[in-house]
Amino acid sequence: MYNLLKGKRGIIFGALNSSSIAWKVAEKAHEEGAIFTLTNTPVAMRFGEINELAANCNNAEIIPADATNIDDLENLISKSMEVLGGKLDFILHSIGMSLNVRKGRTYDDLDYNYFMKTLDISSLSFHKVIQVARKMDAMNEWGSIVALSYIAAQRTLYGYNDMADAKAILESIARSFGYIYGRDKKVRINTISQSPTRTTAGSGVKGIDGLIDFTDRMSPLGNADAAECADFCIVLFSDLSRKITMQNIYHDGGFSSMGMSYKAMNQYNKSFDNPDEILKD
Ligand SMILES: NC(=O)c1ccc[n+]([C@@H]2O[C@H](COP(=O)([O-])OP(=O)(O)OC[C@H]3O[C@@H](n4cnc5c(N)ncnc54)[C@H](O)[C@@H]3O)[C@@H](O)[C@H]2O)c1
């Protein structure tokens, strides 16, 4: 505990269960002295697990909101300022969902209604949260807004599907709005590009186990887990990162800079004993 967020107020989107990255962020933000509200869709809250998190975080208020709905966001932000007693210092956007992925539609056979939903939920919601917060003048100067991204925004990874496009837009929104909000109110906006992580959303990615094994072998520091991602979110919310904005920062153990590692090469070479294996897919 360093009291890095002492006196800071925030909103945390996306804590579904104890595996969620947002769940770990909430626990750490509480440890570091922040007060915040928790939010998710009414459907996600039906499972009730968020109550347990709220109880462990000084009885944090839970305010339901669909992040694609402007009325919900206005209500969330005004209620949050009311219960927390002032303007906000940080917002975590930890939201992603693709119906194409869920329903097994491949990238060359997308359902376009689902695709629009993917973009609305996983990218435009980030713009909506920021736009509503700015219009309501809800952020303090030097406040920090963070969303979670994935390297599929830059590189093609088998099976990541339309979420790759969603993440590319998400990162672009951080740059475009980061300029405007930084210029006007000194509010920072960044995305963190996280290693593949076993969460509910993560488990929906095709071949997640193989992917986690591959990126772990490829990364000199190994994959970053959800708790480590939460640590980095705290740094970005804190005053120790005041001049970082409009960035997409890789939090991936070095994976994004690698081409081939000894560990991955070793694993790959095993398949030479079986040429049929190499030709597959
Ligand atoms: N798990 C991974 O491998 C990984 C890697 C990189 C980035 N990310 C990103 O991290 C973020 C959090 O995902 P997670 O892995 O913790 O999984 P998760 O399933 O725990 O969290 C996703 C959250 O999005 C919420 N959500 C969905 N639709 C919503 C809506 N309309 N309004 C508000 N909330 C909504 C869900 O209820 C859930 O709480 C996502 O943006 C995800 O893409 C995950």
Image (tube, rainbow, N blue to C red):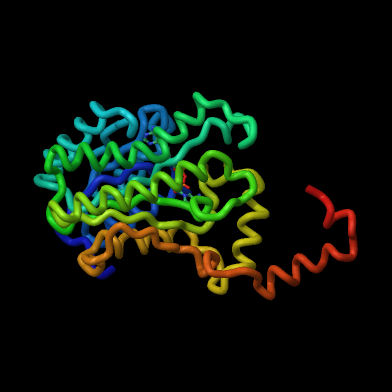
| Residue 121 occupies quadrant | top left
At which x and y percent is residue 65? 30, 31
Q: Is residue 253 left or right of residue 240?
A: right
At which x and y percent is residue 139? 15, 48
Q: Quadrant of ligand 1?
A: top left
At which x and y percent is residue 127? 30, 40
The residue lying at 40 percent from left, 39 percent from top is 49
Decide which of 156, 3 is in the foreground and name it: 156
Q: How many marks?
A: 0
The residue lying at 52 percent from left, 45 percent from top is 164
| Residue 74 occupies quadrant | top left
The residue lying at 50 percent from left, 31 percent from top is 115
Q: Is residue 226 left or right of residue 182?
A: right
The residue lying at 76 percent from left, 65 percent from top is 268
Res 104 seen here: no
Q: Is residue 51 left or right of residue 198?
A: left
- On screen, residue 225 above or below 94: below
Q: Is residue 116 left or right of residue 107?
A: left
